[in-house]
Amino acid sequence: MHISAELRQLFARAKRVVVLTGAGVSAESGVPTFRGGGNTAVWKGMPFDVISSAEMVERDLPAVWEWFDYRRNFLQELTPNPAHYEIARWQERFAELTLVTQNIDGLHQKAGSLEVIELHGNIWRARCTACRTTYSMVQEKRPDACFECGDSLRPDVVLFGEMLPPGAFEFAAVRASQSELCFVVGTSALVYPAAGLPEIAKAAGAYVVEVNPERTPLSSLCDEVLTGKAGEVLPLF
Ligand code: APR
């Protein structure tokens, strides 16, 4: 894997760095991606973007919980891979590292990343459908109903057809517009507004690097494309 001298020099002196990750950064941990490799995930005959939708929460919340309980149990056994650990190390390396993830698996935090901007929420949290109180499910079983207002709980995950958590993208966009170096790791760059972050960084003059075994719609915009698996490429820095 060739990493240009220009990127190595920038990596050595950069202060403000943004990292955007997608499902691909967790692939080597055993987390199935949604796309990539030509297939899309299906649950009980329903495409994932149907079962993971706001409309399904209205129509059949128990079915939504069944899908997320299955995924959470599946994730329970999984551990971070070298890509997660390398990114966690970068928070010490750079004066200002902004880690933005589309992943809900919590593996960045498990690898030691502290401030993770979770654009799509987190599968280890439940949220009240009325008062938005959240409940951790890392150690605890989720309550049957909200202790605050008694209303029902739903996964604290951004579902299709829903807005991102208030302020999360806006904060990430500001950091992207101030960044010198932006890494885009393991995302098909098809889902907006997340996929717009590297575009904001590029427009502001940042050097944009993609890490992915496959080309994406973002590849042509990048200053450098490192074709390979995140767990093999990132430790090379
Ligand atoms: N290292 C790096 N990239 C990888 C690896 C790997 N080991 N394995 C696969 N990839 C790449 C694939 O080539 C693909 O481009 O990761 C990407 C995964 O793409 P998606 O499955 O579309 O995941 P993501 O981009 O995160 O999806 C965005 O869509 O489904 C919604 O909310 C969900 O957050 C998700 C969003």
Image (cartoon, rainbow, N blue to C red):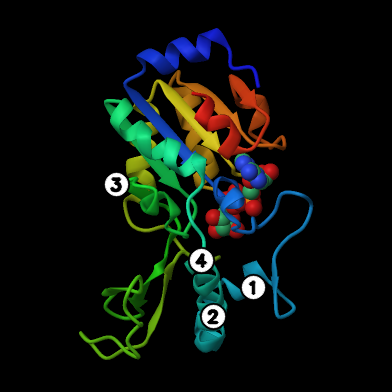
Residue type indicated by callout 2: Val
**Percent position (x, y) of residue 119?**
42, 53
Residue 168 in the image, given as x and y percentages of width and height: 35, 50
Where is 43 relative to 190, above or below? Answer: below
Disc 3 versus disc 1: distance between alpha carbons?
A: 32 Å
The kind of residue tagged 3 is Leu
Label 3 beta carbon less than 8 Å to ligand 1: no
Residue 95 occupies quadrant: top left
The quadrant holding residue 230 is top right
Label 4 belongs to which residue?
A: 77
- 99 and 49: which one is in front? 99
Question: Which residue position holds label 3?
Answer: 114
Residue 205, image x and y in percent? 45, 18
Location of the N terminus by quadrant is: top right
Considering depth in this image, is 112 or 35 the residue closer to the camera? Answer: 112
Q: Earlier in the sequence, mark 3 or mark 1?
A: 1
Q: Residue at x 61, y 57 (%)?
A: 30
Res 64 label: 2
Q: Residue at x 60, y 47 (%)?
A: 24
Decide which of tag 3 and tag 4 comes sooner along the chain: 4
Which is in the foreground here, disc 3 or disc 1? 3
Tell me the crowding category of disc 1: few under 14, some 14 to 19, or many 20 or more residues within 10 angstroms, Cα based: some
Going from N to C along the chain, the mark reached first, 1 or 2, is: 1
Q: Residues within 10 Å of mark 3 (few under 14, many from 20)?
A: few
Q: Quadrant of residue 139?
A: bottom left
In terms of secondary structure, where does tag 3 sit? Answer: loop
